[in-house]
Amino acid sequence: MDYFNYQPNGQLWAEDIALTELAERYGTPLYVYSRATLERHWKAFDQAVTTHPHLICYAVKANSNLGVLNVLARLGSGFDIVSQGELERVIAAGGDPAKVVFSGVGKTAVEMKRALELGIKCFNVESEPELARLNQVAAELDVVAPISLRINPDVDAKTHPYISTGLRDNKFGIVFERAIEVYRLAHSLPHLEVVGMDCHIGSQLTDIEPFIDATDRLLALIDTLKADGIEIAHLDVGGGLGVTYNEEQPPLPSEYATALLSRLADHQYLELIFEPGRAIAANAGVLLTRVEYLKHTEHKNFAIVDAAMNDLIRPTLYQAWQDIVPVVPRDGEPTEYDFVGPICETGDYIGKERLLNLEPGDLLAVRSAGAYGFVMSSNYNTRTRAAEIMVDGNTAHVVREREKLVELWQSEHLLP
Ligand code: LLP
């Protein structure tokens, strides 16, 4: 559930503010987030596992705006990061480094050093060379690095191939069959301390089954390690819980947690870590865009809007479907439109074959744009990136200003 609703006057609002008002005040394209929705989604995870020791580590990559991170940090959230940049954002937003887990296949020595200095909770290590490097960096600082191994459980997440990560063909994690051997190696290295085990099998999962399969495989490994004298204190099940973009019916966090906890009966001592990104942020944001032109041809009708693939690349990159709704709906017969942006690429579209009754100048909201929206935006075609607004009740906070054109080339140079 979210707090973007049509009000009795027929218009779409974010919490207690009309989206028309925000568009007039801040211009379009405009990302608008709802604080109450972010908090509700985070708490849905947290409350689903109250009976068990746990930590919710929001996946920063989904939406790394400082305002978003700050809202979650105030709830006591942990964070899953994949770069020094994300780590510095967490710190700048008031997050606690002791609740940070560091994922990713390509951590540099500089990134490891900074994370060790700040005292993060755990490095989710993805390969043997990474173990060796981390041991070396920790030795240079004369500290011990807490580690978990990301195990690739080889289960099919049944999601889009670009966002499926738990199959043996993917670049992620350590192959299941080698897990014990690599744990023994980690255990033998003097500047590493084995504390956890993790996996992340993919994103936008709408079934519980792959999560449970992966968990069962990991629990079996944890038992084998225990017999070997290697104690695992936490199990990090990654992110990946899907959201409703269209008609998907993903499990609720509570259903997911109940299913997981039922497998943990013999492992009550394990702290559970979740790394949700999309499930917290996606439906806590919309992208507002205005219709510039309506172009009718013999075969197709195009609504040319002021947002483009540089603002929201998911439709172009993954053929993702996101709802496009009028902020002030019109009565009358709808027409079928392809919603396209001003960028010079055929692939520049936000949605295809949607039925709406439109006039030029109409304001539209692209739903479910709070995750993997602004963070994946670019300056392609020398377009400035959109502003971001956080609505909190009847107050709107600018959490990122619209880029100015001159900023786009301020670090570029003419030849002498
Ligand atoms: N943990 C790890 C290690 C991850 O790689 C990811 C996402 C997450 C957690 C969070 O997953 P989530 O709960 O958001 O599904 N750009 C794509 C999604 C890429 C996901 C990458 N990894 C999209 O727009 O659909």
Image: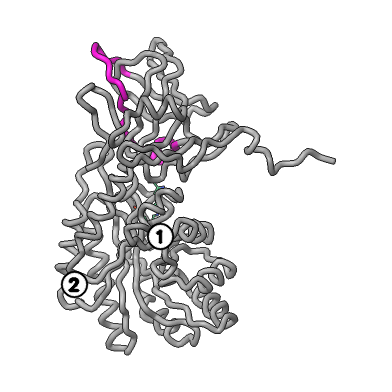
Question: Where is residue 318, by image quadrant?
Answer: top left
Mark 1: which amino acid? Asp
Residue shown at 48% from the left, 61% from the top: 91
| Crowd rating for badge 2 (residues with CA inside 10 Å; few <14, some 14–19, many 20+) | some
- Give yes or no for residue 361 being in the magenta stretch: no
Q: Which residues are magenta?
A: 312-336
First in residue order: circle 2 vs circle 1: 1
- Give yes or no for residue 329 being in the magenta stretch: yes
Real-space Cα distance between discs 2 and 1? 29 Å
Q: Which mark is residue 76?
A: none
Q: Pinpoint residue 414: horizontal percent, then vertical percent.
A: 78, 38
Question: Where is residue 2, by image quadrant?
Answer: top left
Residue shown at 54% from the left, 26% from the top: 344
Residue shown at 24% from the left, 28% from the top: 6
Mark 2: which amino acid? Leu
On the rendered structure, is 55 left or right of 407?
A: left
Farthest residue to the front: give it: 395
User: Above or below — where is 218 with respect to 368?
Assistant: below
Is the C-beta separation of discs 2 and 1 under 8 Å? no
User: Above or below — where is 290 with respect to 227?
Assistant: above
Which quadrant of the figure contains the C terminus?
Answer: top right
Res. 317 visible in picture: no
Q: How many marks?
A: 2
Q: Nearer the viewer, mark 2 or mark 1?
A: 2
Residue beneath disc 2:
264
User: Above or below — where is 140 with respect to 236?
Assistant: below
| Crowd rating for badge 1 (residues with CA inside 10 Å; few <14, some 14–19, many 20+) | few
- Nearest to the observer: residue 286 or residue 246: 286
Q: Secondary structure at mark 2?
A: loop
Whether the residue under disc 2 has CB within 8 Å of ligand 1: no
Residue beneath disc 1:
169
